[in-house]
Image (cartoon, rainbow, N blue to C red):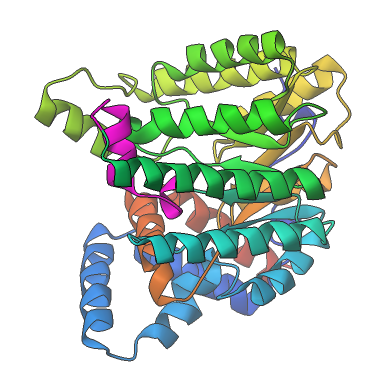
Amino acid sequence: MDLKKHVDFDNLEVAFASKNDKTLKKIHFVFSTMGSSAMVKTGTTLTKLALKSGLPVKGIIKRTLFDIFCGGENIEECQRTAEQMSKFNIGAILDYSVEGEKTEAGFEATTAEIVRTIEKAGNSAHIPFGAFKVTGIGSFDLLAKIQAKETLTDEEVSAFQKVRERVDRICALGHELGVKVLIDAEETWIQKPIDDLAYEMMEKYNREKALIYNTYQMYRHEALQELKDTQKDAVAKGYFLGAKLVRGAYMEKERERAMDMGYPSPIQPDKESSDRDFDLGLEFCIENINNTALFCGSHNEKSNYHLTHLIEEKGIARDDDRVYFAQLYGMSDNISFNLANSQFQVAKYLPYGPIKATIPYLIRRAEENTSVKGQSGRELTLVKREMARRKGK
């Protein structure tokens, strides 16, 4: 199979068309730093200490990691970033990335901000999605207790009802404004109540088309069957399935917990198994496109190439909004920009929030990019090649 038949991810002129020389140098510096696990570990520790001590490091963070991986500190700054991406036919997914809230007041404040992202998307042609984590608007411990089928106190029953109401408030607005809403996946020991909420919202709001999407982490060995079972349920109950496919984000934590607590790991035995099920998931969604909308969240070139072939083979229009490709802002521009340039539907996750509050997100990006299977080496190679190409003009 000619992988590059429909799009070429090695076209660096297209990939970096939105970046000037100064920005490329900044990206080069950041990904060079991420290539050293020792530097990332030291930098992460020092950053946490500096912020805790009140030292003025926000400016440094903003000019480096934050500028590359976040869309801004607020929706207004994100709007400018989204408009810039829209010039290259790439949509934005507003993602309020503040974490760690534990109070009802905090959950309500986060919900209000997520509602603002949906409202903004409803008024912006280039912001097709909103996204949220249920743990941003409800207690992690409460979700764990529900999944473990422990008896809830009256106060906990009331608290979960508030979580359901917040989820419904967000999804109802998405339905009203025609905005697609992504419900992110989380750790397996809280995922069941999140799934239940997502399917409840799908059955309620996906009657005409898929607007609410649940997330399937395909590095879970049960995910492919869950996807198939949900599609069958959607057909039986007369709603459209919104399926966001990702490989997954909590592998080390999941395996460690399973080992510590003595239950079988929910994670696939190896990367090849995850890759296999991810691509089978893409094939299943495309085969069932008449009642399924697919959001392919992947930085894997082979899987993205595979989906372009599936779209062409099925005779689906490249601009059909039932099939979206997506990557994180600041990563895999060679995939995003070349797909968009070839008229496929593409969106970037655009995290935002106050610098201090987005530190956990930025630290995850740094740590993931440093890992053996991370992106830093690939990103750095592409940037170096583009810098050399420009010099050779």
Q: Nearer the viewer, residue 139 or 87?
A: 139
Furthest residue in direction bottom, as rendered? 56
Q: Nearer the viewer, residue 383 or 100?
A: 100
Q: Nearer the viewer, residue 380 or 223?
A: 223
For residue 23: magenta? no
Question: Which quadrant of the figure contains the C terminus?
Answer: bottom right
Q: State the predominant SS element of the stretch in magenta.
A: helix
Q: Position of residue 196 (x, y in %)?
A: 49, 27
Residue drawn at the location 63% of the way across and 50% of the way down: 170
Question: Which quadrant of the figure contains the N terminus?
Answer: top right
Let me know if residue 373 appears in the view: no
Residue drawn at the location 11% of the way across and 22% of the way down: 262
Q: Is residue 311 above or below residue 126?
A: above
- In the visual, does 189 lie left or right of 117? left
**Quadrant in the rendering for residue 180:** top right
For residue 139: magenta? yes
- In the visual, does 61 lie left or right of 85? left
- In the visual, does 77 lie left or right of 361? right
Q: Nearer the viewer, residue 166 or 126?
A: 166
Segment tinted magenta in the rendering: 134-151
Q: Position of residue 104 (x, y in %)?
A: 39, 60
